[in-house]
Image: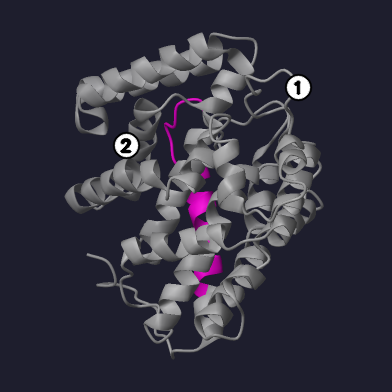
Amino acid sequence: MPFSLNSNEVKGKAIDVQLYIAQCAVLAHNLLYAAEPKPGGASFNYEFADTKTMDFLAGGSSLYAPIFGLSKRGILVAENHLWFEDAELGFYILKALEKAITWYKSETNTIFGTVLMLSPITLGVAHCFTNEGLKTNSRLNLDNVITITDQFLKNSTTDDCTYLTEALNKFVSDRILPSDKSDDDFNSFLEIHQHERTNLHEFTKFYEGRDIVFYELSHKYQLTLKYGYSTFIKVYEETSNFKKSIIQTYITLLAERKDTHVAKRFGNEVATEINTKAKSIIKQGGIFTVQGKQMINELDSYLRTSHARVINPGSTADLTATTIFLALLQGYRP
């Protein structure tokens, strides 16, 4: 059970909350990286041609500063020192990505999806911890966390959208699914709303078909909570094994929705095939059965050898990292 062992002794100070949330973010990223077999995913034994272990670990470590800062913003809003619209969510996301690439040589930004998923929910988590007296050794009500997170997204500003647009164009525009509109790019939302006040909820809703991450932000982390977190907790409470919990969560999310990162790079047909294979693995029991484990290894081999480059379900990995983040925050420990 969470917090039964090795619980942090907290004093109810803002700095305790900031440190706790930031450490959970970095650890979530690194635990996901360490977990094997994770079909198609990067790990210590399976580096990518253009992005090595050192790049991923450096990127993961760079999460600490922006999550620490956003935690403070969430606390200040909860204490009525700032308004929701003053959280500067878009600014923090852009600066996090700009700083991340100064820590490694790879031209690929290793943490974009993770930053985008973790940043809004960090505000919600910090806000809720504040309402609990800044005590991090108590379990959060995740429904409350998501409700507050949604308020931060809906009360963000046009400036936040401008910063996120800059981040998309600068770092990942070639990795996100193209729009079905031939004249659409990542400036389109702001062009449409150039004379209006808008927010990041509307922004992510506009682009929700292009990546699962955008879908999650505009739908209150629906897939992460319903399929990711619920699976993780179920497996952990049955096995007390973090690695098994991560792998089963990853496969479950891969089975639930086609990975948009795969669809962008390899086409919808490949994404559909992988989704179907993942469904079969879950049907066979996944990590709980011999056949399920064999099928996981077979899928991993297929993703690494069937094409000229590794098929990496990157969007699924971002949802899995968020799931681990929430589990750590709730006191679950590897």
Name the dominant secondary structure of the magenta segment. Answer: helix
Residue annotated with mark 1? 183
Tell me residue 175's x, y (percent).
67, 28
Looking at the image, residue 225 sits to the left or right of residue 110; the answer is left
What amino acid type is highlighted by mark number 2? Gln
Q: Quadrant of the C terminus?
A: bottom left
Residue kind at label 1, given as amino acid type: Asp
Q: Which residue is mark 2?
A: 248
> What color scheme is it?
one colour
Q: Is residue 135 above or below residue 118?
A: below
Q: CA distance from mark 1 to mark 2?
A: 40 Å
Between 275 and 155, the one nearer to me in the picture: 155
Segment colored magenta: 20-40
Q: Is residue 113 above or below residue 49?
A: below
Name the residue rendered at 50%, 17% in the picture: 303
| Circle 2 SS class | helix
Q: Nearer the viewer, residue 28 or 289?
A: 28
